[in-house]
Amino acid sequence: MTLHGDALRTAIEQTRTKWGWFVALGVLLLIFGGIAFGNLFIATVASVYVVGWLMLMAGVIEIVHAFGVKTWSRFFYWLLSGLLYAIAGFFAFDNPLLASAVLTFLLAIALVASGVLRAWVGYSHRPERGWGWIVAAGVISALAGLIIAMGWPVNSLWVLGLFLAIDLIFQGWTFIAVGLALKK
C-alpha cells in the first residue's frame, strides 16, 4: 500500500467512529428539507436571504481588497465590483420577492444554456459510448429551464424553495448513507 493509501485508510478509520454524527446530520437535513417542502415560499425567501448575505460579504471583501491593489485602474475595478455586490446584497434583503424573480429568471437562463451546451457536447461525441446519456441530460436541463422561464415570474415564489428542499433531502440521504456505510 502506498503512502496515500495508508493516509486514506487512517482517515477512514478515524471517521468511522463518527458515523453517528453523519446519520444525525442526515436526519436533520431531511427534516429541514421536509419543512422547506411544507412551505416553498418561506424556503424561497430564506434562499434569497442566503444569497443576499453571500453577495454582501463578497462585496465587503472586494471593497477591502480594492485598498490593497497597487494601481488606480484596478482599485476602481475592485471598488466598483464590491459596491455592486454589496448593493445587490442589500437589494435582496430590501425586496426578497423581486430578488427571487431575478434569481429564478437567471436560473432558467443558466439551465437552458448549460442544457444546450451539454446536449451539443454529447452530440459532438456521438461515436463514444454514453453520448446519448449526455444529450439526454442536456435536453432535460434545457427543458427544465424552459419550463421555469414559461412560468416566470409567478413561479418565482416557489422555484428556489423547491430547489432548496430537493437539495436538502438529497444531502440528508447522502449523509445517512455515508454514516451507515462507515458503521459497517
Image (tube, helix red, strand yellow):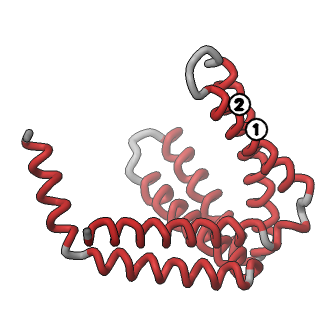
Q: In which quarter of the image is the C terminus?
A: bottom left
Amino acid at dot 2 = Ala
Looking at the image, residue 95 sits to the left or right of residue 179; the answer is right
Q: Is mark 1 on a helix, strand or loop?
A: helix
x%, y% of residue 106? Answer: 75, 52
Residue placed farthest to the front in the image? 184
Residue 139: numbered disc: 1
Q: In which quarter of the image is residue 101?
A: bottom right
x%, y% of residue 127? Answer: 61, 14
Please name the residue that numbered disc 2 is placed on: 119
User: What residue is at 35 percent from the left and 74 percent from the top?
Assistant: 22
x%, y% of residue 94? Answer: 74, 77
User: Dots 1 and 2: beta carbons under 8 Å?
Assistant: yes
Q: Quadrant of the N terminus?
A: top left
How many circles with numbers are drawn on the protein?
2
Residue placed farthest to the top in the image? 127
What distance separates the C-alpha of mark 1 from that of mark 2? 6 Å
User: What residue is at 8 percent from the left and 39 percent from the top?
Assistant: 2
Q: Is mark 2 on a helix, strand or loop?
A: helix
User: What residue is at 74 percent from the left and 60 percent from the top?
Assistant: 103
* Residue 40 vertical placement versus 73 (above, below): below
Amino acid at dot 1 = Val
Q: In which quarter of the image is residue 105?
A: bottom right
The front one of 174 and 116 is: 174
* Residue 74 vertical placement versus 25 (above, below): above
Task: Judge the density around disc 2: few (<14), some (14-19), many (≥20) Cα neighbours within 10 Å.
Answer: many
